[in-house]
Image (cartoon, helix red, strand yellow):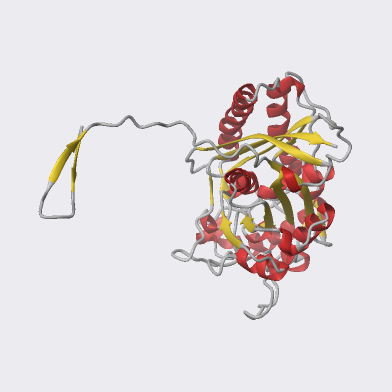
Amino acid sequence: MFEASSCGAGASAVLPATPIKRELIAVNPTHRPVISSTGLFTPEESITNEELVTSFNSFVDLHNQQNSDAIAAGEVEALQHSSVEFIEKASGIKARHVLAKQPVLDPEVMSPRWDERSNDELSIMAEIGVKAAEQALKRAGRKAEDVDAVLCAASNMQRAYPAMAIEIQQALGIDGFGFDMNVACSSATFGIQTAADYVRAGNARSVLVVSPEITSGHLNWRDRDSHFIFGDVATAVLVEDAAMAPASHWDILGTKLKTVFSNNIRNNFGFLNRAHPESADNADKLFVQEGRKVFKEVVPMVAQMIIDEAEKLQIDPASLRRLWLHQANAGMNRLISQRVLGHEANDDESPTVLDTYGNTSSAGSIIAFHQHSEDLVDGDTGLICSFGAGYSAGTVFVRKVA
């Protein structure tokens, strides 16, 4: 029982308790979301492990030389060299694409730099997002007037407002709405579910989920444990009502999102606590993680999440034709796919783009899907899955329609 009071002169009435129904509200079954196409923008410049190690070790030598007296006195800890072998064993990464190679490799800068653009110019993040979106539209045979909404789903935004999505929307000439969303490495899959929900509810027929990931900007290139992790890229996913989708598309069978708070992956940069990346005192304003803890906690969480959701959808996890997993660490993907499929996956069952792209945050699983899905045939079932900071994890089960 609970009491309800009117806005009048103190009148009140006791109303009977009504059970709270927690079932999902049914949506129009005629609105069925699918993935019509994807798009990918890859920066021209790439940094190999060899180039990265040469730059990092030069920085280490310079630091140790400049602080030699303090190091000898035990006041400053000497930095250690990195190596190609260390990087590949720790991550499986061999190269990464970046938007600004020269300043990243400069031992005295070690951070991306580019000329400031005026408010009347397209921002860098919007520019690469537009390129990925245009490719997705072209592949689906779509024009701007066919699209109702743009979601910019990425781990970092170039500015707080206006929303990056609205700038991308304007540049594409789309008459609709747009907004930004950030769930770190799971932003793209969270964006896909959000777009699918709009379609199911009949609030949109065609939604672009754009993920421009300039992760070179939040990486501490001076940290030996993580200086090799990230790269830059932009992806786009066109989610539409099946009634308007091209003949060849991907049915979205089901999606599942999960978040669990953790400090093991963190970035404290923000308008209340800005900092210069060159300052060692401000290292937590860039990407920081407790890698071993992340590995130990995320692998079982994600694997079980996939298995549980597959069972709800009446899909045998072992029957999944392909897993397009988050591209952060080769070891994590190997263990997750093994738990899901029941055996160690080969390159065909769980393709990787990590070796040439590095970790591209939320875009990683979308790159893998974009580059390794054309060969699947009608009826093949697969999984797009992301996981990362938050912790956050997202699954998108899809089936090929040809």
Is 151 rendered above or below residue 202?
below
In front of the other: 126 or 361: 126
Relative image position of residue 398 (x, y in whole percent): 73, 35
Q: In this view of the protein, can residue 354 be seen by the observer? A: no
Residue 166 in percent (x, y) is at 61, 66
Pick the front one: 38 or 34? 34
On screen, residue 344 versus residue 158, left or right, reads right
The correct choice, above or below, for 402 with respect to 218 in the image is: above
Q: What residue sits 35% from the left and 32% below the top?
A: 20
Given residues 151 and 6, the one toward you in this image is 6
Q: Is residue 170 above or below residue 2?
A: below
Position of the C terminus by quadrant: top right
> Can you see residue 361?
yes
Given the current orientation, which residue lies at the most extreme right position?
Answer: 375
Q: Quadrant of the N terminus?
A: top left
Q: Say above or below: 180 vs 292.
A: below
Give the total number of marks visible in the rendering.
0
* Residue 31 percent location from the top left of the image: 65, 42
- Give x and y (percent) for residue 401: 81, 36
The quadrant holding residue 243 is: top right
The answer to whether 263 appears left or right of 137 in the picture is: left
